[in-house]
Image: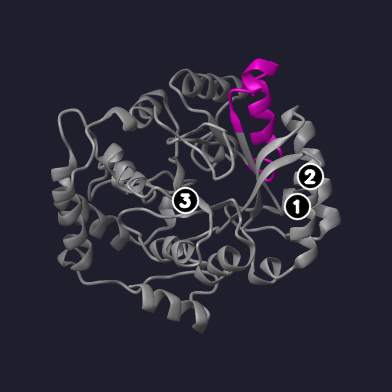
Amino acid sequence: MNYRTLPGSSLPISEIGFGLWTLSTGWWGNYTDEEAVILMRLGFDLGITLYDAADTYGNGRSEELIAKAFPTPQERDRIVIATKVGYDFINHGDERRGQKEIPQDFSPLAIRAATEAALIRLKTDRIDVLQLHNIHLDHVMQDDLWELLETLKKEGKIIHHGVALGPAIGWLGEGAAAIEKRHPDVLQHIYNLLEQHPGKTLHRVAEVTESNTRFFIRVPHSSGMLEGKYTEETVFPPNDHRKHRPRSWLLNGVKKIEQLRFLEKEDRTMGQAAMQWLLKDPRVATILPNIYDEHQLREFAATSSAPPIHEEEMKRIDELVLNHFGIEQEESKFKGLMELPVSLQLKLDVND
């Protein structure tokens, strides 16, 4: 395992992180606390230090799992805890149906209360990375919210602050505004070899605005497509979120993967190559693949030691993406604001 750090920090963040999404929400199968802790402990033994939760995942369960997996002060000091706040699951947690969102509350009073509650569930005195969960543009512009985050830093209750974008792919305007106006330590978003927009642009925004923002990458395998195991006959369980994707997503995705098989080597899987492609960017602090069994965890944790992607392979990838893999491009469905402010777009144009 290789490690990276955030600017101004010495926290050793593993290039491959462990997202608690799959273990605590029930949307990727149901796990007992014991099963979840065993996987998290194995990740720790394999060198994973970054554990990413959210207070709304399982209505607090993801944070409680971290406390159960790493109960001693010595272990706590060896991991990096990231969590998210912003959803009012205390009053609306029983209203969630599938991936339907529940109401948010980003008032300073609510965010302070959510942070204090997360600290109790985590059984710790500080949160290493506190992220505002799926913020909208008005939250980016909310001065008192960002003043609170700085206050929490001064109090030692959080070390770094950040934003998480979502829930679906998109949110270009929100992410760009956050980077340009607030310079968060971390921005978490969807980004992968098959779904490069708007992620690639957000990384360029950080560059041209000279922001120190670093990126936590989720959905690095395009909902499992880039693990290279789907076929045209693949059927997803009824409660699996991929079940609701259009069939064209599966059929076209399989065709794209066949053209990327050159990335597979005897000692490098497609899933590892997909994450190595992301790690080529030094602004990426960690990658959060969906982890749901021991075999997959061992494969992903070994990414740093697999043969790296070389420049010729990167060029072949770029050519395929530029030509849409020779497949008629479907209209993308994004959420959030998908336009940049004119001033920021001009900066990008000048620097291209």
Identified by mark 2, the residue type is Lys
Asked if the residue under mark 3 is in contact with the one under mark 2, i.e. CB atoms within 8 Å, the reply is: no
Task: Give the residue displayed 71% in from the left and 38% down from the top.
Answer: 60
In the rendered view, would you say 308 is above or below 344? above
Residue 105 visible in the shown view: no
Task: Give the residue displayed 38% in from the left and 28% down from the top.
Answer: 301
Which residue has dot 1 on it?
A: 150
Q: Quadrant of the C terminus?
A: bottom left
Q: Quadrant of the N terminus?
A: top left
- Identify the element where label 3 is drawn: helix
Please give the label number shown on residue 241: 3
**Which span is picked out in magenta?**
54-80
Identified by mark 1, the residue type is Glu
Q: Position of residue 225 (x, y in %)?
A: 31, 48
Which residue has dot 2 on it?
A: 154
- Identify the element where label 1 is drawn: helix
The CA distance from mark 1 to mark 2 is: 6 Å
The CA distance from mark 2 to mark 3 is: 40 Å
Mark 2 surroundings within 10 Å by alpha-carbon count, few (fewer than 14), some (14 through 19), many (20 or more): few
Outermost right residue: 109
| Of the image marks 1 and 3, the number of the one nearer the N terminus | 1
Query: Is residue 83 toward the left or the right of residue 273 in the image?
Result: right
Task: Give the colouring mode of the picture.
Answer: one colour
Q: Position of residue 314 (x, y in %)?
A: 20, 52
Identified by mark 3, the residue type is His
Q: Position of residue 7 (x, y in %)?
A: 55, 45
Asked if the residue under mark 2 is in contact with the one under mark 1, i.e. CB atoms within 8 Å, the reply is: yes
**Which of label 2 and label 3 is nearer to you?**
2
Task: Give the residue displayed 62% in from the left and 52% down from the top.
Answer: 162
In the rendered view, would you say 151 is above or below 40? below
